[in-house]
Image: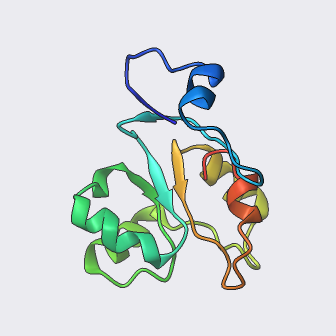
Amino acid sequence: VLTQCGQTPPSDAEVEKLLPLASGYQRKRFTVPLRTATAGSTVQLGFLDYLGVWDRISYITSYAVAACWQKAASCGAELEGQWGGNATLRAAQLSSVDAYFMDCSYTGDCSGVRQQANG
């Protein structure tokens, strides 16, 4: 559920009346525009680049290839690795942003998205 900054968010009942939550799905709430975000993979970076929101992206994957993203990573904006990295640091990075743009695993498992409150 997206709510414009400064506006009162709709109640769960109001949202449910408009669009009932399907089985197996989770409803999340975000205030827009997002002030900070992070990208968990290179998939999202092209879209974020196109939107011109570099200044709102706090952390990026180490696999970023575009010059702007590489520069950001070299200046301390690299997201701690999911495999073999410092799990405590990664959790702190992810919880410090308004939204964490992520995707499901290659097997189609989206449990990580559901488990991340801002994912």
- Nearest the viewer among 68 and 45 is 45
Q: Position of residue 16 (x, y in %)?
A: 63, 30
Q: Residue visible at 30% across and 51% down? A: 55
Q: Where is residue 10 in the image (x, y as percent from the top left)?
A: 52, 20
Q: In this view, does 100 lie to the left or right of 109?
A: left
Q: In this view, does 42 lie to the left or right of 96?
A: left
Q: Residue visible at 51% across and 68% down? A: 78
Q: Residue visible at 67% across and 42% down? A: 21
- Nearest the viewer among 50 and 58 is 50
Q: Quadrant of residue 71?
A: bottom left
Q: Where is residue 59 in the image (x, y as percent from the top left)?
A: 48, 60
Q: In this view, does 8 lie to the left or right of 19?
A: left
Position of 104 relative to 112 (above/below): below
Q: In which quarter of the image is residue 89?
A: bottom right
Q: In this view, does 65 lie to the left or right of 28?
A: left
In this picture the colour scheme is rainbow
Position of 110 relative to 64 (above/below): above
Position of 113 relative to 67 (above/below): above
Q: Where is residue 18 in the image (x, y as percent from the top left)?
A: 53, 31
- Nearest the viewer among 1 and 30 is 1
